[in-house]
Structure formats: C-alpha cells, structure tokens
Image (tube, rainbow, N blue to C red):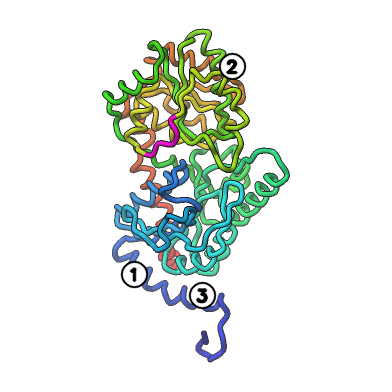
C-alpha cells in the first residue's frame, strides 16, 4: 500500500491512516445514536461454561440488548464449533479458524494478532478479560489503533507447584503488568479483592470495583423437593458444592469435613455439581482414596448447564459450601442465595464478600477442614437465621446496576470520546 507521497507504507502507518479515516464515522455514529461498538477479548466463550465466560456473556448480551454493537473475539477451542462468525443472542462471536495450541489451562492462538487488529479498527473500545496470555499483545495493538483498553480481572493465576507452572504463572503476570500500565481502567469484582490481589495491588489508582453480573431464575420448588428426596439419606442434610473439582477450590477439604459434620449429622450427604475429571489437573485422581472412603455420602452430578436446574439444585440443598484456597468472588454463592440457600465460604479476599455483605452464611478458616465442618453444622442447625429475602439479595447484587456501571466505563473511554477531546 502507498501513501500520498507514493512511497510504501509500513503496517503501523496503514493502521494509523485507517484509524484516522474511521474516527469520524465512529464519532457520528456513537454521538448520534448513543451506540457503542465494543470488542470483547477472551479465550473461551459459550458454550464453554465457567464463571468468567458467564460473566462476559451476560455483560455482552445485555449491552447488545440495549442497542450497542458487541463483538467477541475468542478461540475455536473445539473443532465442532463454527469456523465462521455467528450471532449469539445479539452478540457477534468471532472464533479464530486456526486451531489453538493448549498450554496448561490456556491456549496459544497463532491467528490472534491479525484478527484482533482488524476488529479493533471496527470498534470504539477494547474490553479484555484476564488472566489471558495475549494481554500485552492486545495493549500494543490497541495503542496502534488508538483504542483504549478496559480490562476485567477475573482472578490471579495460581497454578499447582512445578517449574513449568511457575514459568507460566510468571509469564502471564508479566504480560498483565505490561497491559495494566497502559490500560485506561481495570475492573475488579470487589474492592476487597483489589486490595489483596497480587495482580492489582500496584494499580489501585486504575481499579474500579464492579460486582459481577448475576441473575437467576426462581427455583421450581416442586422439582427442588424431588431432588432433595432423591439425595437426602433418611432425611439428613444435603450440602451442595458447585464448581470444578480442581486444586485451588479444595473439594478435598469439604470431603474431609465430613469427619466433623458426621458427629452431628451422620446421615449428611454432599452433592457435587460440576466437572470432576479435568484434563489439565490430576486432582480427581489424587483424591480417589478419599472419595472412596466417604463414597456413600457423596453424589457427583457432573456439569449442568441449565440455569433452571441450577436454581432447583441450590434450593434442594440446606447449604452451599465453597472451600477454595483463593477465590475472587464465586458467582455461585449469590446464585445459591437468590435460590434461598445460605453459604459457607472460606475467608478468602474477594470470596468472603457475598457472605459478608449479605450475612447469609458463615466464613470458615482457609485450608481448615475442621473449621469448614463446624461452620456447616452451625448453618444447618440454625438455617432460618441465615436465610434472607430474595429481594434483599437482588438489591445488593443488582444485575442492571452492574451493566450500567460497565456501560458508563465503556462510554468514558470509547474512541469517539477520545476523538472529541
């Protein structure tokens, strides 16, 4: 490509020319119609299901419902996923056709730079979701295209021991720091987590706390009663667990806590809802003997994607237990509360916030199965004291207020704002 002088232009010069040419169109569109064009970057998107993907999906779809143009750039992590762009509930989903290269929990995406560059030129603001290997690359490309980066940090990367995992962890952190220094705004799930995160502590002046977007259908109590009748042994309590069977979530501590729980409730059962055979970890294999020891008191449902089923699952339980060594929030806590079920959570920064602000549960000592067992017994024994009205929980964790806050941040740093300054 040649410029006005007839000389060949570098890639950077082409990008800058395209950027300056496009700014008037973006400015008119955004100012005239109040519509933003938002590029959201993350590794996994639907149908993959984790707290991170659910978080981004809910923000994306609500912003699309409000009339904004939302594009998600993500990996084609399964070969049966569409290679072409598709619309999903009003959101344009762009999956990279080139197969990604797995590395620990993440993916290396060879086609990412060119796809990201082209999409940035079509959008007003870039929304990144970390941890993510490409964060530094996104920051560089955003700088070339004149777009600002807003990043939501979904939790510090903490991997099991091992030289390769330390390398991965340190590399990811270095990439994050490069991006964070240049980002317009960093979003944390709570101020408590921001104050304690090793990722965020050096960037507190850039952090805005926004609660995650949470909505939950009311439980079908007839189905919940049927589930409880199926799971409860001789009328004993049902303890729920919602999440992956991975090291950082410490499901082994919950199983060990049965030694304490059984002193009061020998007929208690724990129902695990979520994946338990994880490709990148051997946690399930390492705890097979523990599972076998308490097998009569354990039920494993596997991954459940239907939110109505999840509401009924929570409502069928006396209490939900989260026994993580680290947790930035855990959406499942609020989902359980909205379904009328109190929570026992380990006292981790960020993770303790839902119980602390709602008082709908108890906190246990981190890494202490005996404390976990004691707090579970306390909540089961005095359950009515911990249950709060659904409306009170919805008021604290308002879905619309969360998306309003995201929308306000995106508007503040969108390209048309910069063009008018």
Q: Locate the C terminus by quadrant.
A: bottom left
In the image, what residue occupies the spot 56% across and 22% down? Answer: 292
Query: Which element carries disc 1, helix, strand or loop?
Result: helix
Q: Nearer the viewer, mark 1 or mark 2?
A: 2
Q: Residue beneath label 1, please?
A: 28
Instruction: State the mark number for residue 370.
Output: 2
Label ID, residue 16:
3
Instruction: Give the label on residue 18, or none.
Output: none
Q: Are marks 1 and 2 in contact (CB under 8 Å)?
A: no
Query: Which is more toward the observer, 186 or 61?
Result: 61
Question: Tag 2's secondary structure?
Answer: helix
Q: Residues within 10 Å of mark 2 (few under 14, many from 20)?
A: some
Most extreme residue toward the right is: 163
What is the C-alpha distance between the residues marked 1 and 2? 61 Å
Q: Is residue 336 magenta?
A: no
- Residue 211 picture quarter: top left
Q: Which residues are magenta?
A: 301-305
Residue at image coords 50%, 53%: 43
Of the image marks 1 and 2, the number of the one nearer the N terminus: 1
Q: Earlier in the sequence, mark 1 or mark 3?
A: 3
Query: Does the magenta run of residues contain 304?
Result: yes
Mark 1 → mark 3, Cα distance in angstroms? 19 Å
Q: Quadrant of residue 364?
A: top right
State whether residue 404 is above or below residue 256.
below
* Number of residues whose C-alpha sits closer than 10 Å to that of mark 3, classed few (under 14), some (14–19) or many (20 or more): some
């Amino acid at each position: 490509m040649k410029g006005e002088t007839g000389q060949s232009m570098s890639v950077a010069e082409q990008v800058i020319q395209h950027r300056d040419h496009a700014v008037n169109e973006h400015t008119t569109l955004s100012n005239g119609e109040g519509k933003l064009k938002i590029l959201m970057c993350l590794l996994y998107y639907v149908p993959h299901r984790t707290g991170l993907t659910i978080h981004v999906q809910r923000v994306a779809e609500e912003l699309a419902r409000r009339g904004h143009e939302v594009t998600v750039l993500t990996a084609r992590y399964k070969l049966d996923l569409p290679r072409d762009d598709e619309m999903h509930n009003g959101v344009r989903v762009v999956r990279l056709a080139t197969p990604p290269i797995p590395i620990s929990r993440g993916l290396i995406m060879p086609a990412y730079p060119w796809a990201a560059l082209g999409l940035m030129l079509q959008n007003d603001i870039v929304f990144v979701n970390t941890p993510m290997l490409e964060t530094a690359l996104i920051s560089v490309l955003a700088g070339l295209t004149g777009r600002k980066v807003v990043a939501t940090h979904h939790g510090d990367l903490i991997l099991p021991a091992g030289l390769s995992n330390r390398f991965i962890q340190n590399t990811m952190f270095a990439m994050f720091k490069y991006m964070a220094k240049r980002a317009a705004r960093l979003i944390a799930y709570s101020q408590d987590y921001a104050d304690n995160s090793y990722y965020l502590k050096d960037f507190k002046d850039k952090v805005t706390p926004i609660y995650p977007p949470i909505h939950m259908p009311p439980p079908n109590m007839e189905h919940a009663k049927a589930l409880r009748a199926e799971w409860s042994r001789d009328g004993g309590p049902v303890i729920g667990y919602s999440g992956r069977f991975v090291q950082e979530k410490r499901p082994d501590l919950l199983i060990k806590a049965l030694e304490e729980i059984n002193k009061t409730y020998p007929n208690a059962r724990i129902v695990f809802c979520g994946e338990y055979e994880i490709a990148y970890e051997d946690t399930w294999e390492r705890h097979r003997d523990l599972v076998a020891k308490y097998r009569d008191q354990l039920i494993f449902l596997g991954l459940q994607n239907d939110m109505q089923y999840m509401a009924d699952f929570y409502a069928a339980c006396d209490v939900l237990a989260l026994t993580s060594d680290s947790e930035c929030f855990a959406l499942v806590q609020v989902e359980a509360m909205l379904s009328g079920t109190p929570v026992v959570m380990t006292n981790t920064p960020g993770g303790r916030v839902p119980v602390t602000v709602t008082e709908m549960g108890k906190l246990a000592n981190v890494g202490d199965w005996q404390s976990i067992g004691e707090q579970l017994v306390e909540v089961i024994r005095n359950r009515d004291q911990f249950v709060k009205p659904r409306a009170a929980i919805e008021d604290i964790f308002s879905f619309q207020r969360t998306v309003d806050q995201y929308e306000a941040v995106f508007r503040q740093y969108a390209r048309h704002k910069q063009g008018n300054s």
